[in-house]
Amino acid sequence: MTKDRVPCNLRSRSRPLAGHPPQLFLLLGMAALLGYALASSDAACGLSAMTLTLVGSMVGPFTGGNEAEWARHLEKLLKSERDRLIGILDSLEEGIVIVGPDRVIRFMNPSMIREFGDGTGSRCHKHLHGLEEPCRGFCKLPDVISGASERWESRFPDGTTYEIVSSPFADSDQTPCMLAAFRNVTREKQIEVELMELNQLKSDLLSEKTKELEQISKDVAKLREEKRRIIRFLSVITHDLRAPLSATQSCLWAITDGYAGPVNDEQKDLLQRSTRRIDGLLTLISDLLDIPRMEAGQLIQEMEELSFNEVVERSVDSVERRAKEKNLMLNVDLPEVSPKICGSSRRLQQVLTNLLSNAINYTEEGSVSLRVADAEDELRVEVWDSGVGIPPEELPKVFQDFFRGSNAKSDGTGLGLSISRRIVEAHGGRIRAESPCLETARGSKFVFTLPKKTETGTAAGPRGASDAAPANQA
Amino acid sequence: MKKTTRILLIDDDVDFVRATTKVLESKPYEVIVAFDGKEGLEKARSEKPDLVLLDILMPKVDGFAVADQFKKDESLSKIPVVALTSFSDSYGQPFAFEVSDFVQKPVSPKDLLAKVEKHLGRVG
C-alpha cells in the first residue's frame, strides 16, 4: 500500500491527551506491550512475572506435577496467551506502531501494515511519509520519548485523516520508545466537513432569505410611497379638473339666476343646458376618481355620528334646481325627529344625490319622491319616480360596475349605482331596485337600509366594514 | 355698530370669487376678498368680518391652517367660518379641522345665501 507521504502532523493540531477516553489507551497499551513482547523472537524472556501471573489466571491454575509438566504447562500457557494477544492486535481497527529513539520502526500491527505496508526495520519518516530526513519541526518523537503524551490529527494528501495518539513506551530492552495508535478518522472528518458545509449553506441561505426579505420590505415601502404619490397626484388632478368647472358653474348660475342683470327665457334655457352638462361632467370626474379608492376598498374615509335628516336635506338642495327646471314635483317625507346614525355624511349624501338625480334624469313628467322610515334598528330610505323605469332583465345588473342600461342617458360612467351600493354596504346596509314601483305603477324605486347606532356602538360596526378604512389612513 | 354686514371671502379662484361676490352683493353684504390664506388672516384681523367663507385648497396657507388660526386667535374665534369644499379636497384624508359649516363647491346662489343667512343669524 502506497500513500502520498507528508510529515504526520502537517496540517494538524496537537492537543494534550487529557479528555480522551482512558480505556482505549489502557487496552491499546497493554495489548501492544504484550503482543510486541510475544511477537519478538525471545518471547519467553520478555515476559515478566507479573504478566505470567496475569495470564495464568486466564488459562487456569497449575495443579501440581514435575518440572517437565511445569514446562509443558508454561509453554501451553504462553502459546494460549500469545494467540490471544496476537488475536487482539490483529482484530484492532487502530494501527499500532512502535518507533525506537533511532526512528526505526520496531513493530507494526496488521491494521497498521494494511494502511501503510510493512515497514518494520525502516525509518519512520521514510516509511510513513516518504522523507529522507526526519520530519523536521513536526516530529514528536523526542517529546514523546522524554515522557509527554501527544494527540493530534494528520491529513494525508490522498485525503485520509488519522487521529494519532502517542505515548512514551519502554521496550523490552528498556529502550525508551514511542508507541503510537493510528485511527482512521477520514469518514468522521468528511462528515464534519459536510456538516460544516451544510451549516455554511444554511447560514448562506438564511442570509440570502434575510436579504430577500429586506428587499421585499423595501419594495413594499416603495409601493406605499408610490401609492401616496398617486393619491397626491389624483388629489391635484381632481382639484385641477373640478376647480375650473366649479368656477364656470358658479358664474353661469349667477347669470341664470339674474345676479348679473335680467335674463330672458331663451337665454335661461341655454344657460340651464350649459350648467346641466357641467354638472354631468363634475359627477363623471368624481366617479372616475372614485375607481382607485373603490379598488383599494377605501371609499369611506371617516365615520361620525350624524343627523340623517340634515344629510337628506343637503342632497335634496343639490338636486332641487334640476327638478324645478324639469317641472317635476319633489316630495320629501322625513321623520319628525331626525334619526341619528353613524356614517360618512359626505358619502351618504353622495348615495342620496345619486339616487335623486337618476330619478330626475329618467323622469320627464310627474314626481320624484323620497321617504325615510325610522324603524327600531334600521333606517329605510326609498326613492321612487314616475319615469321610464328599468327593463326587468336589467334590474339585477344595475348595481354592477360600469353597467349602462338600455335607457341610459349619454353622460355617465355606469359607476354611480355601483359606488352607491358599496357605500351602503360599507355602512352595513343593503340596497335594491324595483321597477315598476307600486306607488306610481311605473318608473323605478330604489330602497336602501342603514343600521342605526345602538347603545353599544354601531349596529354594523362601520369602522370594521370591508369598505371602511382606518381614519388615519393617508 | 356696523352699518352693513361684512363677509370675508378667502379663495384663490378669481372667477369663483367674482361670481360669488355678485351673488353676495345682491344682499346688503359688503364683501372683502382675500386670494390666499395669509392675506385672509391679515384681513380677518384688520377688518373683523361678520362671517368668513373659506376655500380649502389654496397656495401659501391653506384652509386647514387658516381655520386652525381662527380657533387659536381669541379675536377671531367667535367669527363663524363656512368652509368651501369639494370632494376632491379630502382625497386620501378625512377632514380634521373645526369650522361652523361646510358648503360643497359648486354651490348654487340660493344655497349659498341660505347658508350665509343661517350663520349670520346665529351670531345675531
Image: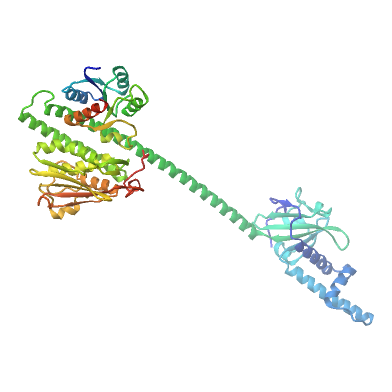
Give percent across and percent down for residue A305.
31, 41
Q: Which of A287 and A457 is in front in this view?
A: A457
Q: Position of residue A137 (x, y in %)?
A: 76, 47
Q: Is residue A257 above or below residue A106?
A: above
Q: Looking at the image, can residue A287 be seen?
A: no
Task: Judge whether A270 appears above or below A358 on screen.
Answer: above
Taking A241 as reference, is B64 left or right? right
Residue A378: x, y in percent? 26, 50
Q: In which quarter of the image is the C terminus of chain A?
A: top left
- Whether A147 is drawn above or below A87: the answer is above
Residue A473 seen in the current view:
yes
Q: Indicate the quadrant where residue A22 lies.
A: bottom right
Q: Which color scheme does this rendered protein use? A: rainbow
Name the residue rendered at 15%, 27% in the picture: A254
The N terminus of chain A - image quarter: bottom right
Q: Nearer the viewer, residue A416 or A313?
A: A313
Residue drawn at point x = 25 percent, y = 42 percent: A308
